[in-house]
Image (spheres, rainbow, N blue to C red):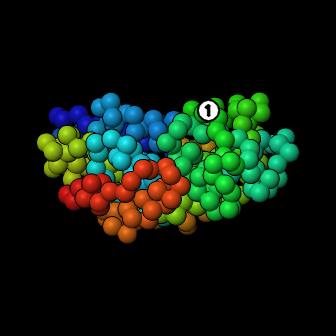
C-alpha cells in the first residue's frame, strides 16, 4: 500500500477528507493517505511541501501562487473550495479599536510571512485605501493560540482569520470582530509537489475522485450540520450559515483566476513578477 502525505488546516472546510479516511475509501484503493493538521496555516504548509514532509496540500490560493513564484516546485491540480474565504477582522475584547478605519497604521498579527493572514492584511489595506508601505506593520504569532496571546497582551492590534473558525472566540469574549474581508477569488486549492506528481499521477487522480465524490454531495449528508458543530465546537446556526455560503469545486483553477491573483499580488508588491498559467497548473 502506497503512503501519501497530505496537509491542511484543522477546520470544517476539510471534513470531507476526514470522512473519506474514516470510511476507509483511500485504503480500498490501496492508498494509505496520511492527513497532517497544520495549525500554522498556509506558510507552514508551504514549508511542508518544500521540505517533502507532505506530498499534497489543501491550501489557500493566494498563498501557494506566491510560494510557487518564490521557488516552491508545486502544481495546482484542482480548486477545492470555489467560494471566497470570509476573513474576520478581530481585535481583543478590551481593545480601544472599534472600526476597520481605526486600525490604519496599527500592527496586524500574522501566522507567518507569506501566510494567508499576512497576504489578506494587504488586501484589506488596499480595500480601505491605506498606504501599504506606511499603514501596515506585522507581529508574527504562528497560529490561532498565538493570536489570542498576542492580541490579549497587546503585542498586536488586530488579527485576520476565517470568521467561522474564530466565532467561538468572539462568542466567549476573547475577540471582537469589527469587520469582514472576503478573498477576491476561490479560497482553497489542492497543490502537489512536482516531483511526486511525475511518478504518482494516477494515485493523485484517485484521491481527487474520492474526495470529489464526497464534496459533490456534502450538503446532503444526513445531519452534516450537527456533525460539524460537534466536531469543531461551533454553534449549529453558525454552521448552517457557513454551509449556505460555501460551495466546493471538482474542477481545476481557471486562467482568469490565476491572472486575478497574480495581478493583485503584483500590484501590492507581494510578488516580483507574473508567470504563465502553465507554470502553476497541471491538468490531470
Left-right relation of 162 to 200: right
Is any part of residue 60 visible from this angle? no
Is any part of residue 68 visible from this angle? yes
- At x 20%, y 57%, the residue is 284
Q: Which residue is mark 1?
A: 141
- At x 70%, y 41%, the residue is 107
Picture mark count? 1
Left-right relation of 90 to 95: left
Quarter holding residue 78: bottom left
> Residue 54, image x and y in percent?
32, 35
Is residue 241 depicted above or below 233 in this figure?
A: below
Q: What is the secondary structure assignment of the residue under circle 1?
A: loop
> Residue 169, image x and y in percent?
70, 43
Label 1, residues with CA under 10 Å away: few <14, some 14-19, many ≥20: many
Quadrant of image for the N terminus: top left
Decide which of 144, 254 is in the foreground and name it.
Answer: 254
- At x 55%, y 67%, the residue is 244
> Residue 3, image x and y in percent?
23, 34
Decide which of 249, 117 is in the foreground and name it.
Answer: 117
Left-right relation of 115 to 97: left
Residue farthest along the bottom direction in this orientation:
256
- At x 54%, y 60%, the residue is 183
Amino acid at each position: 500500500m502506497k503512503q501519501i502525505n497530505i496537509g491542511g488546516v484543522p477546520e470544517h472546510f476539510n471534513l470531507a477528507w476526514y470522512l473519506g479516511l474514516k470510511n476507509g475509501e483511500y485504503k480500498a484503493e490501496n492508498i494509505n493517505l496520511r492527513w497532517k493538521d497544520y495549525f500554522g496555516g498556509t506558510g507552514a504548509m508551504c514549508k511542508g511541501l518544500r521540505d517533502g514532509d507532505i506530498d499534497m496540500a489543501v491550501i489557500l490560493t493566494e498563498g501557494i501562487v506566491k510560494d510557487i513564484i518564490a521557488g516552491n516546485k508545486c502544481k495546482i491540480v484542482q480548486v477545492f473550495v470555489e467560494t471566497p474565504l470570509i476573513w474576520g477582522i478581530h481585535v481583543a475584547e478590551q481593545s480601544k479599536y472599534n472600526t476597520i478605519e481605526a486600525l490604519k497604521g496599527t500592527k496586524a498579527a500574522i501566522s507567518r510571512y507569506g501566510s494567508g493572514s499576512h497576504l489578506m492584511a494587504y488586501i484589506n489595506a488596499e480595500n480601505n485605501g491605506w498606504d501599504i508601505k506606511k499603514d501596515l506593520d506585522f507581529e508574527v504569532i504562528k497560529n490561532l493560540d498565538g493570536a489570542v496571546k498576542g492580541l490579549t497582551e497587546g503585542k498586536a492590534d488586530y488579527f485576520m482569520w476565517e470568521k467561522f473558525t474564530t466565532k467561538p472566540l468572539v462568542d466567549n469574549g476573547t475577540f471582537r470582530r469589527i469587520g469582514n474581508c472576503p478573498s477576491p477569488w476561490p479560497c482553497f486549492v489542492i497543490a502537489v509537489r512536482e516531483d511526486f506528481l511525475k511518478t504518482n499521477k494516477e494515485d493523485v487522480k484517485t484521491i481527487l475522485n474520492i474526495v470529489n465524490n464526497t464534496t459533490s454531495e456534502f450538503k446532503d449528508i444526513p445531519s452534516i450540520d450537527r456533525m460539524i458543530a460537534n466536531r469543531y465546537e461551533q454553534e449549529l446556526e453558525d454552521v448552517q450559515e457557513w454551509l449556505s455560503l460555501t460551495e466546493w469545486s471538482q474542477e481545476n483553477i481557471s486562467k482568469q483566476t490565476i491572472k486575478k491573483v497574480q495581478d493583485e499580488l503584483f500590484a501590492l508588491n507581494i510578488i516580483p513578477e507574473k508567470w504563465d498559467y502553465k507554470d502553476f497548473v497541471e491538468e490531470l
